[in-house]
Image: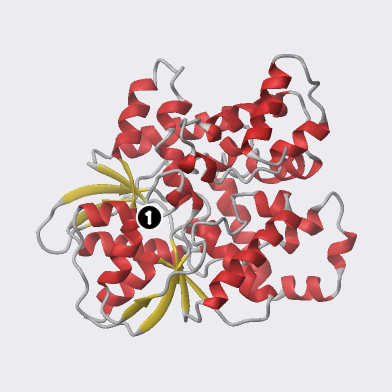
Amino acid sequence: MESPRGRLALMKAVNEGRVELTPRIVSHWEACLQCRACEAVCPSGVPYGRIMERTRAQVRAAGLQSRELKRFSRFFLNSALPNPKKLRMGANLIRLYQRLGLQKLVRLSHLLYLLPGGIGKLESQLPPLSKRFFGPSDTVHPAQGAKKMTVALLSGCVMPLMQGPTMEATVRVLTRNGCDVTVPQGQGCCGALNTHAGDLENARAMARTNIDSLMAAGVERIITSSAGCGSSMKEYAELLKDDPEYRAKAVRFSDMTEDVTEFLVGLPFQAPTATVNRKVTFQDPCHLAHAQRITAAPRTILNSIPGVELVEMENSTLCCGGAGIYSSVQPALSQRLLKRKMVSIIATDTQEVITANPGCMLQVEMGFKSQGKNGRVRHIVDILDEAYGLE
């Protein structure tokens, strides 16, 4: 049953009453990465991702989610993500905990094993937070040179806290290419993680919040530097199709949304003139390659940078195992996928792994660390911004 067809067959059997919905049945669905790779090659165009999201909503309503997913939902999906202020407050406390050296002390002392309710397990998965947080503001970042367009940038939830400098680089790259950039107040998480977990109620609320705040800015495009966010935002029209107040707004919003690589190539962007002598490989995020069908744009950008040698890894579109919250709720399966991905990465003998999604960045960084290897993982806008800065 660990295949798209097998999982679809189980869904059909449960909905027809031929099979009882049990934790064992649910385990087959929760093992799915929701990477959407099956959609990209399906000759019948089955919208597997949407079907799985609705199925997980049924599971959630029945109270049959796994203990790991329930715990993660309680601490993160239902509490922190819907509330940007609470999320940032928690992030500030975690950053202080890390910068004071308390995290290192706790881990060395093995106190994690004494913490109740799986808190120790969640703590062990905490990545280092960014030294500088990024966030919405009333500032309009003006275009350099002739203005081509006004765009809004999704700040989101994870990237501002863990990859703040990458968000700043995104703003610089966009302004360098003739865009006025605004990061509107009032926006929040895109809702992707909640959608994947079957929490459609919170996901819809997040979508409405972003539609209101980003479209009120009067921009021509809505840009994201997170592949997972872009995929989710492009599907707001589906998520809110039964909402009479937001249905038309959601269609417009989805049509305006573009991944930063897609947007830059379509603009088109200015190729850098400075040389960056570096050998790199590119990790295709699942929700960029499969859900959005974008694979050429990031390679066009990398190949435009003088001195950059792009070495393709084997199975570059194979999931790294991050898959949103998958690494937290299915750690064993996630690690198996990561080990396979690291074999492909290390075989390229490159200096940097470039990708276009925050979750992939964190997962591959974990892969290097777990193998005791030095490896640098960067977002594609970081290396483009570096090249512009050398001019």
Identify the residue at the far left of this view: 146
**Neighbours of disc 1 within 10 Å: few (<14), some (14-19), many (20+):** some
Question: Residue at 40% across / 81% down in the picture?
Answer: 279
Query: Residue 135: horizontal and vertical position, in percent?
Result: 43, 54
Please tell me which residue lies in front, 226 or 138: 226
Label 1: element kind: loop
Left or right of 342 on screen, residue 384? left
Image coloring type: secondary structure
Please tell me which residue lies in front, 201 or 277: 277
Q: Name the quadrant of the N terminus.
A: top right
Query: Residue 385: horizontal and vertical position, in percent?
Result: 31, 71
Query: Residue 51: horizontal and vertical position, in percent?
Result: 57, 28
User: Can the viewer see residue 100 in this picture?
Assistant: no
Left or right of 72 on screen, residue 148? left
Identify the residue at the far bottom of this view: 277
Question: Residue at 60% across / 70% down in the picture?
Answer: 342
Residue beneath disc 1 = 295
The image quadrant that residue 62 belongs to is: top right
